[in-house]
Amino acid sequence: MEILIAGERLRLRRATLDDLNYIMKLQAAPENLKFIVPFDENYHRKNFTSADKMDVIAEEILTGERVGYFMLRKLDTPCAEFTHVIIDKKGRGYGREAFKLLLKWAFEIKNFHRIWIDCKDYNSVALHLYESLGFVREGLLREILLTNGVYENLFVLGMLDREYKRDKG
Ligand SMILES: CC(C)(COP(=O)(O)OP(=O)(O)OC[C@H]1O[C@@H](n2cnc3c(N)ncnc32)[C@H](O)[C@@H]1OP(=O)(O)O)[C@@H](O)C(=O)NCCC(=O)NCCS
């Protein structure tokens, strides 16, 4: 098991083939699907061994139970992208704890320069979470997604290493 980082209640580890069904199930759940762009099984299979992409599982330290997953891309550049932020056990602070751990891993252990993420403009829970963690809304990609015949907008949010360090004081 490749543990990336551990916190109070959760630890993050690299996903493996054993997590594929879990990841596909979370992607397809209607309450998640409306906020993401799903990827197929083959794409995720490559993430398990790829050098520039990774699926990350968040799980409870106490029980070992999975609570969600993230997908990270562009890991071979100074500017990594976080995408597919999905928490299965919602509304218990797990999203905030897992995301904080991911930022700590990215900026304190891996020394990325920049982390960025995109988010549908009406996804108020995710936008609130990202902005409260210090992400800056950098721009709006207008009508960039066509979902069931409707064009949707995406905000791009970013955080730089110096902003992360400044906010940590
Ligand atoms: C967005 C998501 C990852 C957040 O994870 P979570 O574990 O549910 O969130 P948390 O419990 O850590 O709460 C984070 C913040 O959002 C707020 N929040 C959570 N659920 C909420 C809801 N239903 N309505 C309003 N605010 C909510 C919390 O109050 C908290 O803010 P606070 O600390 O200032 O009080 C999760 O809800 C999810 O998987 N959503 C579907 C997929 C998605 O939208 N992904 C993001 C794509 S960009």
Image (cartoon, helix red, strand yellow):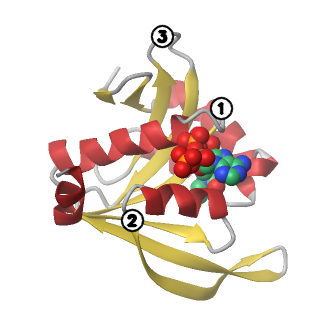
Question: Which residue carries the number 3 mark?
Answer: 62
**Residue with the mark numbered 2:** 135
Of helix, strand and loop, which one carries label 1?
Answer: loop
Residue 154: quarter of image:
bottom right
What's the residue type where badge 1 is placed?
Lys
Furthest residue in direction right, as rendered: 149
**Of residues 77 and 123, the one drawn nearer to the viewer in this rendering:** 123
Q: Residue at 66% across / 64% down in the picture?
A: 123
Of badges 2 and 3, the one in the foreground is: 2
Q: Is residue 152 left or right of residue 93?
A: right
Residue 132 appears in the figure: yes
Name the quadrant containing residue 87: top right
- Mark 2 Cβ and ligand 1 under 8 Å apart: no
Spatial CA span between label 3 and label 1:
15 Å
Q: Residues within 10 Å of mark 2 (few under 14, many from 20)?
A: many
Is the CB atom of the residue marked by disc 1 within 8 angstroms of ligand 1's nearest atom?
yes
Measuring 45% from the left and 58% from the top, which residue is drawn there?
132
- Residue type of the residue flagged with mark 3: Leu
* 21 vs 70: above or below: above
Quadrant (top left/top right/bottom left/bottom right) for the N terminus: top left
Q: Amino acid at mark 2?
A: Phe
Of pointers 2 and 3, the one earlier in the residue sequence: 3
